[in-house]
Every structure is written in C-alpha cells, then in structure tokens.
C-alpha cells in the first residue's frame, strides 16, 4: 500500500520501481543496455523467487503426502516394492513430482504427465524390474498399449484409467529433432548430423530420432560454416601426424641438449647458452642471445649450475661418499699417467725453428704442443735434455726413485730395500751389456744419418729399438766392421732375411734327399682315407691362411722410394716399422706392393702475407668440411661388422649389398665404429 501523504512525484517513482521489479521477476526479462551487475542481481532474484515458490508449494502439500522429502532421498533403500506399487503418482502435485524427479536425478522440466512418465519409467527399470508380478502386469499393459496405440503411461493401482500421451510424445520428439540439422559434405559425398545445442557432429543418425522423422537440412551459406567430422581414416592420419610431430619435437629437443648447455652468470644475473665443442681444447663461446629454436618453442630447463645445486642438495651421504671416492680414483689415475708421460716424453730443442718440441720415445712421435696432462707441470727440465733431437744423452743419468719411509722402518725392511735396489742395478747393467753386444749404432755414409744394426737377425732400422728406453749406444766405428756387417750391403743391395737364413743351412746331398722323399711317399701310401682327408683339409686351410695373411700384408705395407739412397724401402703403416727387405710371405707372389709417391710441398716459399695465410686457412677449412661431410655419408652407407667365425671386422655397403675385408680407400686414416 502506498502512503497517502506521499507527493505525486514520489508516487510515480515508487510505481516505476515496482514495475521494474515485476519486470525483473518475469522469465523472459532482458536487461537491455543496463549494467552487468543489474543483470546478475535479476538472475539472483529469479533464483530466490523460484526456490521460494517450490518451498511454499512443498509446505502446502506435505500434509497430503504419505512420505517426507527425506524419505524420498533414501526411498531406494528404505521403501519396499509393495509401497511403490500402491502409490498413485497422479494424485501428487507438479511441484512434488519435480522434487521427486530431482531426487532421482531425472530431468525436472516439462508438464505433469511427462514427469509422471519419467518417474514411472524409472520405477519400471529399477524397482519393478525383478518383480514377477510387476513383470506380468507390465506385459499385459504392453499388450493393451499395442492394441490402443502409443500409450506409455500405465495405471499406478488397479482400476486406474489409461492416459494417451501421443500428442505430448509427438511434441517431445519434435523438440528433440529441432536440436539437430543435416549438413551435406561435398568432399565425403554424405550427410552428417550437427547438434545445435551441444555443438557435436556425427555421421550416424542420433538414436533419439526415429527413422520416420525427417531432420531439416542446414543452409550451406549459413554462418558459421560447420566442417564435417573426421572419418576413421582421417582420424588415424591425424593421430599419426600428431605422434610423428611429438617424436620429432622430442628428437629436436634431445639434439639441442646434446649441442647446447644452459648456464647462469652470477655477475650479470643473466642466462646464457654455450655450444658444446667436439674438441675439448676449443674455448667455449657464450651466447647471450639464445639460438632460434630455444627462444620460444624449446627450453633446456634449469641452468647447469642450478641443476648441480639441486643435485647436491638432495644428495645422500652414500652418494657423496661415492663421488668423493670417484674423484680420488681419477686423481690417482691422472698422477699415474703423469709419471708415465714424464718417463716417456722428452723436451728437445729445434735449432731450425728456434723452438722446443716434445718427443715420445715409445711411439716415436713428436709434437709442438705440450701433452695435456703435463700442462700444469712446471718442472720441464725433467722431461729431457734441451739439445738436438739426436743429441747424445747422458748415460749416467737415472730416474730418481721415490722411496717410501716404511721401506726403512726397521733393519729387515732396509736390508730388503737395499737388496732390491742392488738387484735392479745389476739386472740393468747385465741387460745393457747384452744389448750392446747385439746392437750396433753405425753411420750411413750416403745419408749421413745413424742407424741400428741387429747382429742376431741381420736387420737394420733407422729407429732406436724400444728396449733401449732412455739409454743410447755410442756411434760404432765402421772401419773395424767386416764386409758382411756393413750397412752398405743392406742399404744398396738389400738381402732378404729368409734367403739369408736359407743360405746358412747345411747343404743336403742328393742321396739323402732321395731317401727323405721315399720316406714321405711311404707315409702317404700308409695313410687311411680319413687321415688323407684331414691332411688335405689342413693343407687347404694353410694355403687359405697364407693367402689371407698375404692380402693383409699387401694392405699394411707401402713401397716408398728414398731419393737419398735411390732405393725402395717397405713401410708398415700399422706398426710404423720400415725395412729394406720385402716381407718373406710376399717374395713368392708375382704381385708387387703398391708404390706410394712422396708428394712434394706445393709452396716453395714461406707464407708471410696475411691474405696468403687467409687463403691457406680457408682451403684447409673447406677440406675439413668436405672431409667431415664425406665421413658422414660413409657412416650412413657403410657399416663395420664383426665376423665371429674369422674373428675379424669386415665392411658392408648397405646401398650395393656388397661386403669387403678391406677398408674403403676414402676413409684413409679414419675408421668406422663397429655396429
């Protein structure tokens, strides 16, 4: 009621507010251009009002209902089938039926008859499904429904009338069909169904629409354009493409992790990347700008420093102990290798270049760079004398022996140590005497270089034998040597060691040779078939082994011409030994070892100009890139496989399907890793 004392303007404003509130309570009210909060307030008012109406209707009719709302929630466990058989759903109001449908998790919209049908269907399925009497009544009702037409609702108690819901059911089917549209796909030449409410697409006809009902066709020009659903083949293709894309991304990420590392700079407080170098001597360059693939799509995770800190933070005592033990073993191993290198490496002076170089007495190799393990070793004087490479070393100098204090702990230990030192001294002295008797160091008058002559095997070599170690012989006076021991006979007219050994054998008379031949024939005649077969097999295997060994020797040896002596010598690429004589197994073969030509240096002058050095470096770089590309192609095409029968490796060409015991010529000094 309005206050009579209110002014006309106030009454008009109050009427306007009441009309606006009533408009908001209507179901189809739209706020128009009002603010969003007014719309939310109206929605909340409508929800509260509907809840109020439901609560009021339930309070009004709860006295006429035989069970309460709480019992409705648990009716499936607390109520018997006889109870539901005696309930008449038609006597309940629409709000009560809505509450009952909500309790059963059924749709609560629609008219009273539709709610009764839903609840009755649920009762037939869950409550009366296993009741024999109810099944018999349902079968009788089904027969009556078939006789009278499409009647779905049955009587709730004996004597109830049937309700014809065909008009309601037709409206329901029409409302369901209005959700769907048929769309024609030109690429598939077939119709598919589109749900307007849920936005779902399907090639199969919806189960809730009967075959007699015709679904409307969507206008092809309507917006938005609906694309057809995927067929099984298209879906499989898309899944395979997605899987291949995932595999490619994983492979790319693994390659990026193998190539780059992510670090954190504490001073600048910035993240940078480092490219992993193949050679550890190359300095690593900091990339402050990440590579293109690591900018947006891929990420290497946390920096290396943070990963180490996280690893150390979560480390147990046993893991820390293992790491410390591993570091100590590595330190001991490095110290052991340093001791070995100090005993083998010599630091020598090159008078031509005016620089020091390092010579390995074991491998006979020299390098300008100091070995990596000895970079932090400041005591370079112990590596050898600073004279020329062939300077005569001091014979009296010996390595200092580091004696531990426990070796002189008592008199017995000191006596054992002194005896061991004396035995070592006596053994070394005896060995040097034997070596001095067998080997002689002579001067070649043609080349002017010293060589070593072995008087036992009657062979000569330019390299000092490894048994000498740091010891070297004095230059022997060639004038006192007999003609058979001179180097001139070996150098100018090389003689095979096999022929030399054959010439020293005692001569056999013709009569003794005939007797030996008769004895051999007699033994062959007395052989059985098995013995003869085994003898032939052994001879065949021996011949095959000689042929294979001959092929290996042909691959290992090179025939090189010496312009100083104007003679050929044979060089073994695997052992690094050079001989004037041809190997004994290759003497009877008609083939000759392939001659290797010594390529002279192309440049006759030293490179001094910057542009010449630039050209030379660019040439080397192109050669290196081409060589790496060639090795990559060879790794993709050729495999190195181990043969368990012959216990050797062979090379298999995947393109031609051929295999060979010989390494491809294009590999040269490079070799493939076994498969």
Image: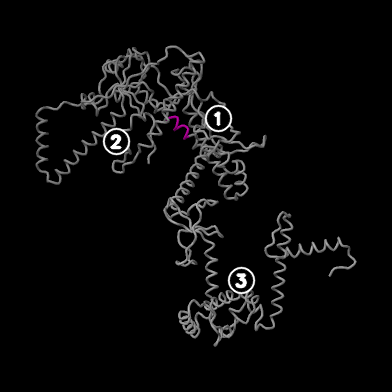
- Give x and y (percent) for residue 656: 30, 37
Asked where in the image residue 68 lies, by quadrant, the reply is bottom right
Magenta residue span: 419-426
Is 420 contained in the magenta span? yes
Does the rendering let one see residue 412? no
> Which residue, given by chain and number where applicable, does mark 1 sit on?
283
| Sequence-first disc among 1 and 3 | 3
Give 468 or 41, whichever is nearer the viewer. 41
Circles 1 and 2 in contact, beta carbons < 8 Å: no
Tell me which residue sits at (62%, 77%) in the image: 74
* Residue 298 vs residue 4, the one in the foreground: 4
Q: Position of residue 589 (x, y in %)?
A: 21, 27
CA gap between label 1 and label 2 equals: 41 Å
Mark 3 lies on residue: 108
Element at label 1: loop
The question of residue 231 being in magenta is answered with: no
> What residue does disc 2 label?
660
Closer to the N terminus: mark 1 or mark 2? 1
Q: Quadrant of residue 460?
A: top left
Disc number for residue 126? none
- Tell me if residue 189 comes above or below residue 370 in the rendering: below
Q: Main secondary structure of the magenta part?
A: helix
């Amino acid at each position: 009621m309005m206050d009579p004392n209110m002014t006309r303007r106030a009454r008009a404003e109050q009427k306007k507010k009441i009309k606006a509130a009533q408009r908001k309570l209507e179901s189809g009210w739209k706020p128009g251009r009002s603010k969003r909060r007014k719309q939310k307030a109206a929605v909340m008012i409508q929800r509260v009002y509907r809840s109020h109406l439901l609560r009021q209707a339930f309070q009004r009719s709860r006295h006429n209902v035989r069970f309460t709302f709480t019992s409705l929630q648990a009716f499936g466990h607390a109520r018997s089938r006889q109870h539901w058989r005696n309930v008449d759903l038609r006597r309940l109001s629409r709000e009560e039926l809505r509450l009952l449908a909500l309790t059963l998790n059924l749709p609560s919209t629609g008219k009273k008859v539709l709610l009764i049908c839903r609840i009755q269907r649920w009762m037939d399925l869950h409550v009366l499904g296993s009741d024999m009497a109810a099944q018999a009544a349902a079968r009788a009702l089904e027969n009556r429904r078939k006789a009278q037409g499409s009647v779905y609702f049955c009587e709730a108690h004996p004597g109830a009338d049937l309700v014809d819901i065909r008009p309601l059911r037709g409206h329901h089917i029409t409302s369901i069909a209005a959700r769907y549209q048929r769309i024609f796909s030109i690429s598939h030449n077939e119709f598919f169904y589109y749900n307007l409410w849920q936005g779902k697409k399907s090639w199969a006809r919806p189960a809730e629409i009967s075959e007699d009902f015709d679904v409307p066709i969507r206008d092809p020009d309507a917006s938005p354009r609906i694309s057809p659903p995927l067929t099984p083949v298209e879906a499989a293709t898309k899944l395979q493409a997605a899987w291949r894309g995932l595999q490619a991304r994983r492979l790319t990420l693994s390659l990026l992790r193998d190539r780059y590392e992510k670090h954190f700079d504490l001073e600048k407080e910035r993240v940078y990347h480092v490219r992993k170098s193949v050679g550890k001597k190359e300095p690593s360059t900091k990339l402050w700008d990440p590579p293109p693939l690591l900018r947006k799509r891929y990420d290497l995770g946390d920096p290396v420093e943070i990963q180490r800190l996280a690893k150390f933070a979560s480390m147990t005592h046993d893991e820390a102990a293992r790491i410390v033990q591993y570091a100590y073993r590595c330190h001991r191993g490095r110290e052991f290798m340093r001791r070995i290198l100090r005993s083998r490496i010599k630091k020598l002076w090159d008078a031509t270049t005016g620089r020091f170089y390092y010579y390995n007495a074991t491998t006979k190799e020299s390098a300008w760079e100091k070995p990596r393990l000895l970079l932090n070793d400041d005591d370079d004087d112990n590596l050898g004398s600073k004279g020329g490479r062939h300077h005569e070393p001091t014979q009296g100098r010996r390595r200092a022996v580091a004696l531990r204090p426990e070796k002189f702990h008592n008199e017995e230990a000191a006596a054992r140590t002194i005896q061991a030192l004396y035995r070592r001294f006596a053994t070394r002295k005896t060995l040097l005497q034997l070596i001095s008797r067998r080997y002689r160091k002579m001067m070649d008058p043609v080349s002017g270089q010293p060589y070593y002559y072995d008087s036992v095997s009657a062979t000569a070599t330019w390299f000092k034998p490894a048994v000498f170690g740091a010891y070297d012989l004095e230059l022997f006076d060639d004038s006192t040597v007999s003609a058979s021991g001179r180097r001139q006979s070996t150098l100018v007219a090389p003689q095979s060691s096999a022929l030399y050994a054959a010439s020293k054998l005692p001569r056999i008379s013709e009569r003794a040779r005939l007797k030996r031949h008769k004895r051999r024939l007699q033994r062959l005649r007395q052989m059985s078939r098995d013995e003869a077969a085994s003898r032939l097999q052994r001879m065949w295997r021996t011949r095959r082994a000689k042929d294979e060994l001959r092929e290996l020797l042909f691959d290992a040896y090179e025939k090189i011409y010496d312009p100083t002596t104007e003679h050929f010598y044979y060089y073994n690429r695997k052992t690094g030994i050079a001989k004037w004589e041809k190997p004994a197994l290759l003497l009877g073969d008609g083939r000759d070892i392939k001659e290797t030509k010594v390529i002279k240096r192309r440049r006759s002058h030293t490179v001094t100009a910057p542009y010449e050095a630039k050209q030379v470096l660019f040439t080397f770089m192109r050669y290196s890139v081409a060589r790496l590309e060639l090795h990559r192609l060879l790794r993709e095409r050729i495999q190195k496989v181990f043969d368990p029968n012959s216990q050797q490796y062979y090379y298999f060409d995947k393109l031609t399907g051929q295999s060979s015991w010989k390494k491809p010529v294009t590999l040269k000094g490079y070799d493939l890793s076994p498969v």
